[in-house]
Image (spheres, rainbow, N blue to C red):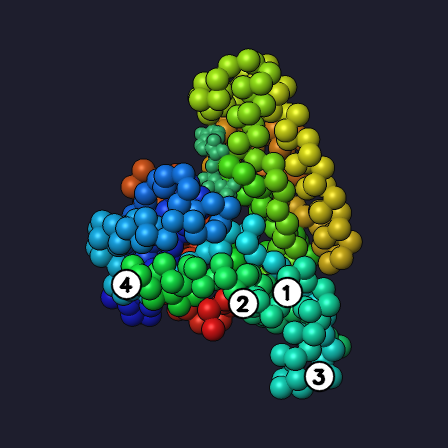
Amino acid sequence: MSLFGKPKAFGLDLSDNALYLMEVKGESASSVTSAAHFELPKGLVEDGKVLDQEQLVDYLRNAVAESQPLAPSSNNVVLGLPESQTYIGHFRISKEISKKELLDEVYAEAGDNMPIDLENAAWDYEILATTEDAHEILFAAASAEVVEDYEHAMNLAGLDLKVLEPEALALSRSLIKPSDLEADQGVAILDIGARTSNLQFLDKMGLQLSLSVRVAGNDFTAAIAKHLKIKVDQAEIAKRSKGFGDAKIAATLNTIMLPLVNEFVEARNFYEAKVIRKVTDVILVGGSSAMPGIDQELQNLLRIPVSLGVPPFSFTDLQSHQIAAVSGLAMRGRILSSGINFIA
Ligand SMILES: Nc1ncnc2c1ncn2[C@@H]1O[C@H](COP(=O)(O)OP(=O)(O)OP(=O)(O)O)[C@@H](O)[C@H]1O
Ligand SMILES: [Mg+2]
């Protein structure tokens, strides 16, 4: 048993296409005590919302039952909520305000600034830093209905949802050690999935800016199918096997990359002006990061070093980008405490 005793919960990464479960007992690559992976059929979860409660419960039960090498040591779950269902904001709140009043002040600020009705939301906040005159607040919210649906599905599967946190926080926990960052250094994590690309900028203080762009892997495939006049499944194969290695496909892919690169540059400029730090590295994850040559192409377009994200753990033949998010969720499962949590 490790110094910290048994893990308090396992991590669960649930996307529209797949489910990953992982429990870890420590911080080394071989710390995985329990893990499972299932592809999900269409229509079960869509855009981060549970559509088929009953079938999802079956998958959850199977994931727990088939976990390897051991069964999870508890029924407690740390779940990630996709970027598309999460609202994240930052405020500065005067240090003059007492601890007791801080909560009310955060609520008032969020009410004024966040594009979600807080009456019908689950929300939480964290103090990222305290400067001479202000608290830097990281605020996150999600629809109460979406949160309840996940809680309900977990309960039906005999699980206990202890933590529900924005996926962005799990990814950064898994991919970046804040202690490795210089005081004036910013890093971007770019997660290019199937439907959305999620971008976050962070530094020693934590998550500073996150946004979602509706351009991702599905658009790459659709563009290849259209320009090469081939079927979508053939285009998917060409994308995965050739990617930027084929000049004709690369030209097509670049038409899709362009809006993504523009969004990146705009967000980067905003972030750098706001925090007076320079973004020195881009860490690439998500299924589309496996496309041949995408890292080099992005590096050329952004003129910042781009590397593929590597989580601290490995499991069987699963690739780094597949387990990046669940690794961060499993890490939180070791201690549970501190951090944004949508579960009251
Ligand atoms: N080897 C590969 N080469 C290119 N693209 C790939 C490869 N493997 C997976 N993909 C693409 O990755 C995408 C799926 O990525 P991921 O699993 O990160 O998505 P997701 O998290 O379920 O989706 P989203 O975040 O958009 O909701 C698909 O578009 C798929 O075509
Ligand atoms: Mg994703």
Q: Quadrant of residue 264?
A: top right
Residue at the spot 66% in from the left edge and 55% down from the top edge: 209
Residue 177 visible in this rendered orientation of the protein = no
Q: Which mark is residue 97?
A: 3
Residue type, numbered disc 2: Ala
Q: Earlier in the sequence, mark 2 or mark 1?
A: 1
Q: Earlier in the sequence, mark 3 or mark 1?
A: 3
Q: Secondary structure at mark 3?
A: loop
Label 2 – label 3 distance at C-alpha: 24 Å
Q: Is residue 253 left or right of residue 111?
A: left
Residue denoted by label 1: 117
Q: Secondary structure at mark 4?
A: loop
Residue type, numbered disc 3: Ile
Label 3 – label 1 distance at C-alpha: 25 Å
Where is residue 179 shown, x and y percent of the image?
55, 60
Q: Is mark 3 within 8 Å of ligand 2?
A: no
Residue type, numbered disc 1: Asp
Residue at the spot 62% in from the left edge and 59% down from the top edge: 88
